[in-house]
């Protein structure tokens, strides 16, 4: 199997959709002799920030000299982004080999009467196998959806991290924040510490579940404190204090916005818990790892005239966070948005949190069969200055013509826009 054949095989699995549950993945991993048990893991979920927190923690572990795997989703440009070792994406050859290896066991299990695994289940099993073959010592595993019945929830992590809880995936996890919190609390394991910034009733539910399982809880705002000391040259300085361990220090990260203060604090708290069993995870490694974190497409800044910001905000909470970051990092600038969104998202909620009357908005269609038509989005933007572009590249060109040197162009609304935007900007740079 080569890389195009691996992608074609995965695409063929999309017909099975998203089916929450662990029976299929557990059967598959048992046939594969449990590759996920060959290394230590950290499990990370949350409505927003789980990817950034995962990237920060993986970078810290690498800085400590620990061979580290990182499993995330979705990808921005290429499937190989989903599985990295020591900051390097899996090669296309290794990706194809891992998928081919996993497929053998899938076909055996299905022949024995097992329901066919989904695309994400096959990818997850392939990632676990790849990390075992690569000889990682730790793997940071980001949940795909929810937590309780997500196919990643077969690991026994050293630490479980729940960044925050707001409404998302209500069709899969239930209609209320407490329903969502129950799913995310499903990654908590007996006797294993839990790190969270969840507040209110969701935080109470996580605290209750942690107590039931005898899992020590480390809560942002009680055990973990952090504040931004400002941004300079597109780098953010953050002071973090951990109450129980006494660790206190200043950390620098290229990830911008006040929301990253919380994510950074959770990553440092998790690293400190791991450090109790591994002296390589020193304060020096934490500082270096934070400073070297790379997480594309999340308030990613392309400096220039005009400056372009690329962000995957696609729900109301993410939109609120993005707007706050724009106001903080570019307080004097007006914003021109290139905006596209999926039809199954809370579009009105995103609009409410993200846009201001003075903003100009160019609507485009994300590269997804679930994309909302720009014309239908425009109907929700009465009173705003809007245009419709027939392609993402055309939308970016329109924004460039409208923007003055002191303005900011922001591409947002869907992760499905981000990879293509980054490709277009790279091509423009080469021209």
Image (cartoon, rainbow, N blue to C red):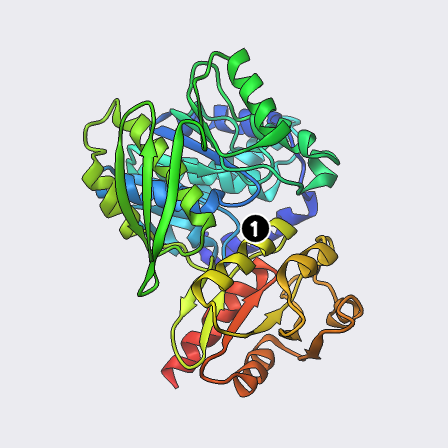
Q: Residue at x 52, y 14 (%)?
A: 211
Horizontally, residue 373 falls left or right of residue 234, namely right
Q: Position of residue 88 (x, y in %)?
A: 32, 52
Viewer can see residue 316:
yes
Residue 138, quarter of picture: top left
Q: Position of residue 413 (x, y in %)?
A: 61, 61
Q: Which residue is nearer to you in this view: 49 or 358? A: 358
Q: Which residue is mark 1?
A: 9
Q: Residue at x 59, y 72 (%)?
A: 337
Horizontally, residue 428 falls left or right of residue 63, namely right
Horizontally, residue 76 falls left or right of residue 305, namely right
Check the picture and name the quadrant holding the C terminus. bottom left
Q: Position of residue 98 (x, y in %)?
A: 42, 43
Q: Position of residue 407 (x, y in %)?
A: 49, 78
Secondary structure of the residue carrying numbered label 1: helix
164 w.r.t. 155: above or below: below
């Amino acid at each position: 199997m080569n890389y195009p054949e691996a992608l074609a095989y995965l695409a063929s699995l999309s017909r099975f959709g998203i089916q929450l549950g662990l029976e299929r993945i557990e059967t598959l991993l048992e046939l594969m002799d449990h590759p996920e048990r060959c290394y230590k893991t950290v499990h990370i979920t949350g409505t927003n920030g789980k990817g950034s927190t995962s990237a920060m923690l993986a970078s810290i572990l690498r800085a400590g000299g620990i061979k580290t795997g990182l499993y995330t989703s979705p990808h921005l440009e290429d499937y190989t982004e989903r599985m990295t070792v020591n900051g390097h994406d899996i090669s296309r050859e290794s990706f194809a080999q891992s998928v081919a290896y996993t497929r053998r066991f899938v076909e055996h299990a299905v022949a024995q009467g097992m329901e066919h695994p989904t695309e994400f289940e096959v990818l997850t099993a392939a990632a676990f196998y790849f990390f075992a073959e690569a000889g990682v010592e730790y793997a940071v595993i980001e949940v795909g959806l929810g937590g309780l019945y997500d196919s990643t929830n077969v690991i026994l992590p050293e630490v479980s991290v729940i960044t925050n809880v707001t409404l998302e995936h209500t069709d899969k996890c239930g209609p209320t924040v407490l329903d969502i919190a129950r799913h995310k609390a499903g990654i908590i394991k007996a006797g294993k510490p839990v790190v969270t910034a969840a507040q209110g009733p969701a935080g109470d539910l996580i605290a209750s579940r942690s107590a039931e399982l005898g899992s020590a809880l480390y809560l942002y705002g009680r055990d973990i404190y952090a504040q931004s000391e400002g941004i300079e040259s597109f780098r953010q300085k953050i002071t973090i204090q951990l109450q129980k361990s006494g660790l206190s220090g200043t950390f620098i990260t290229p990830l911008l916005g006040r929301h990253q203060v919380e994510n950074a604090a959770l990553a440092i708290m998790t690293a400190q818990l791991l450090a109790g069993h591994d002296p390589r995870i020193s304060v020096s490694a934490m500082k270096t790892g934070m400073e070297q974190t790379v997480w594309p497409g999340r308030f990613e800044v392309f400096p220039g005239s005009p400056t372009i910001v690329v962000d995957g905000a696609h729900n109301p909470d993410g939109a609120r966070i993005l707007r706050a970051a724009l106001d903080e990092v570019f307080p004097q600038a007006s914003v021109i948005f290139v905006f596209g969104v999926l039809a199954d998202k809370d579009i009105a909620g995103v609009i409410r949190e993200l846009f201001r009357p003075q903003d100009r908005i160019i609507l485009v269609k994300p590269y997804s069969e679930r994309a909302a038509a720009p014309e239908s989005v425009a109907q929700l933007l009465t009173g705003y200055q809007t245009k419709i572009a027939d392609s993402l590249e055309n939308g970016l060109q329109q924004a460039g013509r409208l923007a003055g040197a002191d303005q900011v162009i922001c591409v947002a609304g869907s992760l499905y826009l981000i990879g293509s935007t980054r490709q277009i900007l790279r091509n423009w740079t080469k021209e």
